[in-house]
Every structure is written in structure tokens, then in C-alpha cells.
Image (cartoon, grey):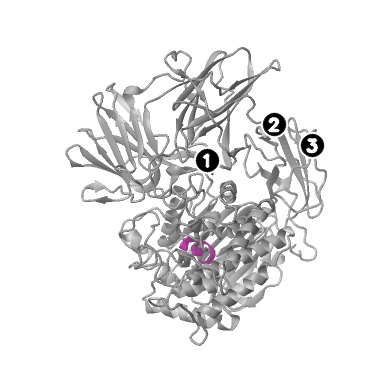
Amino acid sequence: MHELPDGWTPGGPLTAATLKTEYAVRPLGTDVRRPRFGWIAAAPGYGATQSAYQVRVGSEPGLGDVWDSGKVPAPRSFGIEYDGPPLTARTRYHWTVRLWDGLDREGDWAEPEWFETALLDEGFGAARWIGGANMLRKSFTADGTVTRARLYASGLGYADLRLNGRSVSDAVLDPGFTDYDHTVLYVIHDVTELVQSGDNVVGAELGRGFFGLTTPNAWRWHQTPWTVEPQLLARLVIEYDDGRSVEVVSDESWRVTGGPTVSDDLYTGETYDARRALPGWDTVSFDDSSWHAAVVVDAPKGKLVAQAHEPIRVIETVEPVDVTEVRPGVWIADFGRTTAGWTKLAVTAEAGTVITLTHGETVADGNVVAVNVHVESDRIQRDEYIAAGKGVEEWEPRFSYKGFRYVQIEGTSTRPDVLMREVHSDVRTVTRFTSAQSSYEQFDRAMRRTILNNLHGIPTDTPFMEKNGWTGDAQVGGPTMLASLDLARFFTKWLGDIRDSQAESGQLPVIVPSSGWGFTDLSPATEWPTVYPFLLRELYRTYGDERLLREHWDSLTRYLSWELDRVEDGLSVSVLGDWLPPGFGSGPAPEDRRLTGTAYLYRAIIAAAEIGDLIGKPHEYRKAAVELKDGLNRAFLDREAAVYKSGEDPDYRQTSNAVPLAFGIVPEELAERVAANLAADVEARGFHLNTGCLGVGVLLPVLTAHGYADAATKVALQRSYPSWGYWFDLGADTMWEKWEEDSRSRNHYFQGTVVQWVYENVAGLRNLDAGWERILVRPDARGQVDSAAIHTETIRGRVSVAWKQVSRVLSLDVQVPVGVTAEVHVPSAAASDVTAVPAPYVGEPSYEDGYTIYTVPAGLWTFTSRSA
């Protein structure tokens, strides 16, 4: 804890705000038996600390009749585990907290929040999985005053749930995609306001998703162990004011029929025949006598679990910037941005008219490019709407999404009315970055958009081509993703997917979830599934989540045993390597991929060692790490030249040298020479990179760390090929898969990790560990920019850094929340050139390598250097 100056009274008293349960505000249903609580502690002044807390859980707001923690002496403000009697299923609990500060001053109780439990051990009761067609409905009667109604449902692959003619939620593509042989997610909706006195109807329309996908594809999603026709499990619980409770459950009494959605497929799109539409099918006045009885079907093998991560939603609706008739009856709409989602259509046409909408990221020869060599179909990303001939007709798909900027519309002679619907997981943006250098802001916007476009319940590689959860992409992108978005729930879910995908041998596939593809296909590829320990460690760094580490330890150790068992002569064999460096548009450069494979396994082993230490599990991982380091250096380090290389290298490989430097593999006595050679190669190439996805995220931080920030800046701001500026000069608004102009995907985040350097070195904010308990403020890449600012909503509160330089005078503002200690490095020629406000509270600084260094606790601090 930061030591306060003599006679200084720290800020306080404390207040608690932003109360969350399992990382969520007011979760409507959790299957976690001992949910965890968290809050943001805040106080005026400087140096405030939390010394104790008291949590109360009650059946009503303000009560502590369920559990009272008592006063607990601890500074912890998150991950506080419920420790009362077993929770009851389908119950709302209210909780609050009060805090004590460093002087033991007692704060007020926070405004109460609530959470609800899900089904827990009750399960779905008498409900059965049913199918038989894609539209299902059930009539029922409500005979009293409804006080509460909850719909628990799992429609696989996706379900559009309805009650009395209205959607029960704004969630789409729901529930989330999983390995259905291990985990099946169900959703919970509050439908109290939708249940009406008297007759009611609950209904669902089902889509295939990855559960029932039938189009042949390279990843064998059409041949998974779980592939069957769509099906539904539902339990509607209605409570009345007289204490009664009644249920409506899915069974053979439901009625089913085929609907207007003739086909749906995540790769090929949807066909909707409006002539088959059944207006009012989900209302009480509809006659379903011609429908059939539902069929009870076999349940999927996976365990039913309440969905905890954020749902996918329509985030924004965008009008086209241009609609052009390229040929008679053929129109191309340009929406001016690259996104993931779908098109909403409004059309007037004769009955039977087929309107096609083909989605793509580029246009060539007067056509939108929609080609996918991995999918066996004559249509890719193409929706078809067959008109009913009833005036203005509006339609949008519900069971597939596309990656696109352009839409080619055919079948109408008049200008089509189309809107872009931007669709992705509704995760919260936590970071805002601004700078006088417009390119850096452009990088930030493009990377954030690209990441969001690839969040659909799992982190994907491209919404246009694959929609797969490539582990290597999340490996390199994870730190930037966590730095810009709140992904606590999202990544917790995906880590569960990783565990579900594990083979008996311990091996992990290169895509998660997996149909079974990715164990021998493009595998083993060490740099990809080693995301498992790395991401666990990163989530602890970001959210301080120790429970997650414990839950995954056994699976993690099984996986690493598999990896270590196949090490030969201290090296790990990998078939993927540094994917898509400049000039190698079909894969990695022809180099020995054991170099990066071994380096990534080394980093994974170090991460596992740290995890083991954190949760008190015995291990020998550091011994294994030494053997890997020695093996890599023995095989690939030319000590005389201070260069890492392999016999197959076509030239000097920046990734081969930057990765060992970044991961701490280079012998200490050679590190500066290896870095100097790396900087020399960058300069020799006219300040261009030659890195693929593995090297791009570490190149600039390594250069900056070793004193070559100017070289890093020139690479970052480069405009000619290969560079980010080259993409943007070609009209990019997202990050691309390849450096070349013919990149097959223009919505691919793994080459966009320059943004991490922008946050950490240009803005100068670095999270060191344990849920932002310690931060480093050090803007050490200030070339060609005279100001930058960043603020991040962390699990402990807002952290912000803003600096501005005029001539040699630099002002630096730093906001530190309660529970965080900041080490602030102020660029200066001497410590005497720096002033700090408030001066009495900052303590005595030290000076090292051109920076005056202060260590400060909570508060808003201002530093001014006269010799930056």
C-alpha cells in the first residue's frame, strides 16, 4: 500500500457505486451457486483506500436477511463471493455494500442492486425438447393478476421467441454458439408485461446456426456430432398475486408448421418466401388447426447452463451513402463502412418476384465480390426475398449474419430501399483515445470496429469468410481487445468453449468451438491454442479473476502436458507460424516455424507457472520453460551476429527477433545487440515491417522498450506498402487480413494490434497486473505527436492519462482510482525540471533513463516537465 506523507489525512470517506454480480448489472438469471459481487470505490481527495467492506444480501432492498458478511477487513472490491445459505432457484435477491476507508471511517450503504438466480437444480422440469418444423406455438390461459413471469428457453441453433405477437427480447442470434455435446445455453426473459389476462400464445421460430448447418464446408460444420434439425426447449413460469404458480412447457401439445423462412445458413444466407408468411401466427386470434403436433426429440448431450455473456443485438442502423444502378435491374448499395450484420429491405413488387441481396466487402467488375472457396455452394452471403405482392413489404433476416460494406440488389427495376443493420455482441466500450496525430485515432477506430465485427458469442477471424473462433487470432489480439472493451463475461464464456473442445489426450484444436476439425487440420500449431494459458493470465491481469484460474487449472495442465510431451530437442513443432507477412499471401514465410512455436509455448508455460503460484498449485513449469528457452536459443540464435534465424529464412525475419525479445527469451547479454539489429533492419527497409500476425503486435513495443521509439513511430505512421497507412489510403475503415491490396478479408483484427502500442506507449498507460492494481504511466513514443489522452473504465474505476507537449514543456495529467497505485514516468532531463501538483502528496521522486519517477495513490495528479 502506498505510504502517505506524515501528517496527511487521506481522501474519504468512501462510497460504493456500479454494483455488479458476476460482472453484470442486474443479471436476470445466473446458475453460479456462489455468485461474486463487485463495486467501484470512490472518494474525494488524495490517497483514499478501502480498508474494509460489509455486504448484505436480502429478500427485499435494504434487508440482510439472507446473508450478512459482517465487517471484513480487506481492500478487495471485486470477486467477493456469496457465502450464505444455498440460493433458491428462480429468485430475486437484493444486495448492498458499505465501505470503510483507511482511517476506518464508515461510509453509507450503497443504493441496493439485485440479481436473479436461474433454474439451478430445478432444470426445465416437465419440459421436453421438441421439433418437427421451424415455427412452433402454444396457446395457454392466464387466469389472475400476474406478478412475475419468466421464460426460460433454448432454441437451437437460434430462436426468435415471441409472446402475444411481440418479441420477448431485442437479442438476436440467440442463444450463443457452443460445443453442443458439452454445453447448451439457455436464455431467460422477463415477460411479465407481455402476459395478458385470458388467452395467450407463446411461440418460437427456429434457425439453424452452427447447430443444424447443412451446407458442406471445409470445417465440417455440416458433419458435427450434434448436427440435427433445429429444436426447442422452453419453460414459462407465471406467478400470480394469490401465490399460485403455473407453467407452460414445451411438449407434444405444441403446434408446429413450416414457415416462410425456406432456408437459412450462416455462410450462404437466407431465403424468405413472403407468400408463405402467416400474419399473426404468434397471436391468440390465429387459427393453428392446420398445423401439426410437435415431435419430442432427443436432447442434445450438452449440459444446460444459463447464458451469462452479453447477447448479440442490432447495434446501429445505417443508411447507404450511395446506391448505383450498375446494369438494368442490378443495384449496388455502398454503406460507407465495413461491418457485420445484415440488410433490411423495403420493396414493392409483384407476387413471386425474387429480390436477391448479395453481401461483400469489395466490388470488382461491376459486381459485389462474394466468394468463399471453403463452402460448397453457388451462393455466398446472399439473401433471397420472394415478394408477396402486397404493397410495401419490409423484411430482414434473423438467422445469419454477413461481413460486408456493399450489397448487390437484383430483381427490382426501381431504386431499392435498403438499410445496414450492424450486429454484434453487445459488449461495452471501456476505453476512449484521442490524439493530435489523426492516424493514431484512425487506428483506434478501425481496430475497435474490426474487433466488434468479429464478436458473435465467440471471437471470430472474419465475419465474411469463416466465422470461426481461431485461437491464434485471439492470442495476438487478446490484450488489445481487453484494453478497449469489457470482455469479462465474453471471454469467460469462450474459455469454457476452449475447455469443452479439449480432446481426451489434452490437445486443443486451432478453432474453438470445433466440429472435430482443427486437431489434425492445420495442426499442431503451437502459437494458436497456447492462447489458453495466456488468455487466462490476461483475464487475471485485467479483472483479477482467481476463480477462473482455479476452474481451468486441471484442463490447462492436461493441455500443457500434451504440448510438452511432443517437444523434441527443446523445440515445439508448429505448422502455421507467423501467418501472412508481407509478400507471403497464402501463409507464413518459408521459415522454420519451430522458432515461434517454441517461443509461444515458452510464454504459455511462464503464464501457467504464474497461475499456479497465484492459486497455490504445485508445478514445475519454470524448469520446463528454461529447457524451452535453451532449446530455442541453441537452435536459432546466432550469438556472434546477435540474430535469430533459421536455415530456410528468405531474408532477415523481424518476427523471429522481436518475439524472443518480447517474451524474455534473449540472453541478457545479447538483448541490446539483438534489438539494435532489429532496428537496423527496420531502417534498412525504409521503416517498413515484414511481420505477419505474430510479430506485428510486438515489433513496435520491443523497438520502443530498447530505445528505438523513433523507428517504431516511423513504422506506425508509414503510408507505403506494407503499412496500416497503405490500407487507409486505399479506403480502409477496418483492419485487413493481409498487407496486400487483394486481401481476401477486410475485417480481420490480427494485424491491427498496433493499437496496443498506441495505448501503452503513445498515450502511455499500461496495466501491470491483478485487476489494474498497479499501473505504469510512461509516454515513451511521442515522436510526430504533441498530445494524446486515454481513459479506461477498469474494474476498480476510471484510469486516465492525458499529456500535451509545447516545445520542451510537457504537461501530464493522471487520474488514479481507489485501489490502484500508479508509477508515473515523466520525461525530463533532470528531476529538478519536474513539478507535481498537489506537491505535498507526491513524495520524493527518483530519476532514471530520462524520466522522473513518482509513485502515487488515488487522486488526480498533474506533472509538468520543463525539459521533456
The boundaries of the magenta stretch are: 753-761
In-front residue for pair 319/282: 282
Q: Would you name the residue on which mark 1 appears?
A: 176
Name the spot of residue 584 as percent of width and height, x first: 36, 66
Name the spot of residue 415 as percent of width and height, x first: 23, 35
Which three-letter amino acid code belongs to the residue tagged 3? Pro
In-front residue for pair 551/695: 551
Is residue 323 something one can see in this rendering? yes
Tag 1 secondary structure: loop
Q: Residues within 10 Å of mark 2 (few under 14, many from 20)?
A: some
Q: Residues within 10 Å of mark 1 (few under 14, many from 20)?
A: many
Quadrant location of the C terminus in the rendered image: bottom right
Tag 3 secondary structure: loop
Name the spot of residue 95 as percent of width and height, x first: 72, 37
**Mark in the foreground, 3 or 1:** 1
The Cα–Cα distance between marks 1 and 2, rounded to whole angstroms, is 22 Å
Quadrant location of the N terminus in the rendered image: bottom right
Which three-letter amino acid code belongs to the residue tagged 2? Ala
Relative to 115, say whether 611 is above or below.
Answer: below
Q: Would you name the residue on which mark 3 appears?
A: 85
Q: Would you name the residue on which mark 2 appears?
A: 89
- Which quadrant holds residue 842? bottom right
Relative to 499, say whether 318 is above or below.
Answer: above
- Residue 772 within the magenta-colored segment of the rendering: no
In-front residue for pair 782/690: 690
